[in-house]
Image: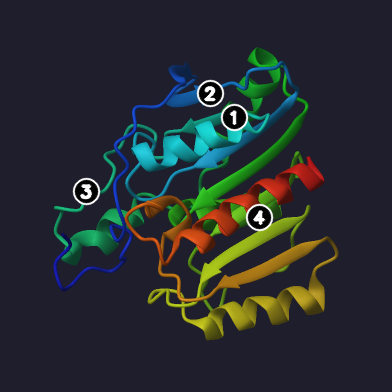
Amino acid sequence: MANESRSCPCDIGDRLDYGGRGQEVQVEHIKAYVCKPPASTDKAVIVIHDIFGWELPNTRYIADMLATNGYITICPDFFAGREAWKPSDDWSKFDDWLKTRDARKINKEADAVLKYLKEQCGAKKLGVVGFCWGGIAVHHLMMTDAELKAGVALYGLIKDSDDTSNLLNPTFFIFGEKDNIIPLHQVTLLEQKLKKNCKVDYEIKIYPGQTHGFVHRRREDINPQDKPYIEEGRKDMINWLNKYI
């Protein structure tokens, strides 16, 4: 478990004992996990990992779940070969570690992945989802890449000073009511900025009683009181993608 000085409770929740049904591929300078649906499709979703990296079983489980719902899914290593964070690492060094992995400086990797999806997978309709660190990345990409027709940012940290409202395409924001690194006043500020300036569809939803990481980190059978909200969050994510892709 993380020590008392941890900066992000991303290790809260349960690791899934899950191997994945996709395959690993090389996409230019990065590795990626790819899963394809049973039927041919031109719809694809990029899944952006949290601080624990692209190999985390929980994230691959979500990628596979999206694939079973009709999307080519790809979970690239947005750390580009640099080590992911481990729960056993010293959280007092987390801020220094994070400085070399800026979620807003991933456009090079995103461009490589988009090229791969279009040229190698025949994808024409593209979306993106991301968790925690990946939620920040989704928010950034939805303000910078018009090719992404829908985005779902799950518990991505917001700062009061962030430029948050210049979304290019519909974006859905998922937050937990009891998330102790994303205070509700920051969510309210995001909503105010979007309401004032955003020109595209968006939605912000806060799930009662839920903590950081609940959509991809909690196992329904171990946390029965959370099960309805886990399922609701996953269904909401899929419904948003279905609506706009």
Q: Does label 4 or label 2 sit earlier along the sequence? A: 2
Report how far apart the C-alphas of labels 3 and 4 lie in the structure: 29 Å
Report how far apart the C-alphas of labels 2 and 3 lie in the structure: 25 Å
Amino acid, disc 2: Cys
> Circle 2 is placed at which residue position?
35
- Specify whether 5 is left or right of 232: left
> Circle 1 is placed at which residue position?
67
Residue shown at 78%/26% (left/top)? Answer: 124
Q: Does label 2 or label 3 sit earlier along the sequence? A: 2
Q: Does label 2 or label 1 sit earlier along the sequence? A: 2
Bin the neighbour count of mark 1 within 10 Å (Cα to Cα): few under 14, some 14-19, many 20 and up.
Answer: many
**Near-viewer residue (73 or 84):** 73
Name the element at disc 2.
Answer: strand
Residue 229: image location, x then y, percent = 52, 63
Bin the neighbour count of mark 4 within 10 Å (Cα to Cα): few under 14, some 14-19, many 20 and up.
Answer: some
Bin the neighbour count of mark 3 within 10 Å (Cα to Cα): few under 14, some 14-19, many 20 and up.
Answer: some
- Specify whether 82 is left or right of 75: left
Name the element at disc 1.
Answer: helix
Amino acid, disc 3: Lys
Residue shown at 38%/53% (left/top)? Answer: 217
Which label lies toward us, 3 or 1?
1
- Specify whether 83 is left or right of 5: right
Residue shown at 35%/60% (left/top)? Answer: 223
Contact flag, marks 2 and 1 (Cβ < 8 Å)? yes
- Residue furthest toward the bottom? 185
Residue shown at 44%/18% (left/top)? Answer: 23
> Circle 3 is placed at which residue position?
86
Contact flag, marks 3 and 4 (Cβ < 8 Å)? no
Residue 195: image location, x then y, percent = 78, 77
